[in-house]
Image (cartoon, rainbow, N blue to C red):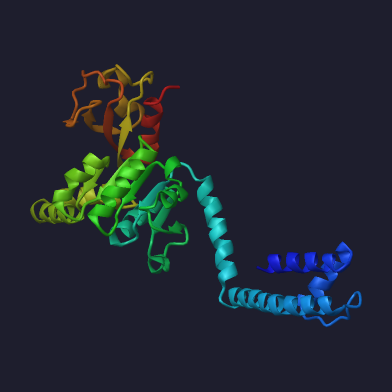
Amino acid sequence: MLLLVLVFGTVGYLVLGFTLLEAMYQTITTVATVGFREVRPLGPSGQVFTMVLIVLGVGTVLYNLGVVAEAVTEGHIRQQLERRRMDRQIERLSGHVVICGNGRVGTAAAEHLLSVGYQVVVVDKDPHRMADLDPRLLHLVGDVTHDDVLRSSGIERARAAVLALDTDADTVYVTLSARAMVPDLVIIARARHRSSKEKMVLAGATRAVNPQAIGGRRMAVFALQPQVGEFLDVVMHDENLDFRLEDVRVEPGSELAGRTLADLSLRERTGVLVLALRRKGASEFEPGPPEDVPLPSGCLLIALGTQAQLDALSALATPS
């Protein structure tokens, strides 16, 4: 509106016989209520035009000044600058994890991912849920059922997405959208109801998880086998312990592909303990794989070891 008023005033004074510089000067001094004298004497038509310009221009200028003052006093400018800085950081991310929904499940997932060194982008439509976020977390306020918000999170460059939304219907919808955008994305969907798990997998989720069911099973394990439950809990979730339990994929052309565990001597070379094997396309694990079984290309190894040991195994499983 301010730009339109300036153009309107400049064109009007040009028609009244002013030069371009005079017309711009007269317009700005008029709408700014500075009170300088006219550049040229005004006839009746010029006076009428100036009155119209004052009515339109002064109101527009005062409104703009009010908006600027409000933005400064309420911190809107600082918020906008921080938002732009965070958007630029998200645009530079690659291999991060997108968490949709910052409730209890989403918060717990974000804390664990941060503790093991992953970059995380949290998306939620409720700004109040973002109030006490860890400062290391990048975040975005928006509805992930809209594709533009999902893209703004950098999901097309992400390693994985954790969907912990308020309803299973929203989770299924976002799963469909994310799978269409990134066919090979790892999508972990939270199912509030057990009956929704199958639907989420059919929609494209890599895995659907019901936190209540998992929590109940873990409590039962602690009741019957407390030492086993504690060991698994510590290995998977204790950031202070050196040992980790991870999966390592055997890539085609790597040193591991096609060779047996006995030939490779992984225990002596890397220090890791191979607990299980999962062949490519298989749904079941083979616990304690025999030493004389060749490792097929594309299989997954479940291994236990320190981070350095697991990194050494990953290097052997990747073509040089």
Q: Can residue 116 be seen in this view?
A: no
Residue at position x 19%, y 44% from top? 199
Q: Residue furthest front?
A: 44
Q: In which quarter of the image is residue 274?
A: top left
Left or right relative to 96: residue 68: right
Using the image as rendered, state which of residue 209 and residue 238 is in the foreground.
Answer: 209
Q: Position of residue 143 (x, y in %)?
A: 38, 57
Q: Which residue lies furthest to the bottom in this view?
A: 35
Q: Is residue 248 visible?
A: yes
Does residue 281 sit above or below 292 in this rendering? below
Does residue 50 sit above or below 180 in this rendering? below
Residue at position x 56%, y 58% from top? 84
Using the image as rendered, state which of residue 7 and residue 244 is in the foreground.
Answer: 7
Does residue 126 sit above or below 181 in this rendering? below
Q: If the image is split into quadrants, where does the C terminus sit?
A: top left
Left or right relative to 315: residue 89: right
Left or right relative to 213: residue 63: right
Using the image as rendered, state which of residue 104 and residue 230 is in the foreground.
Answer: 104
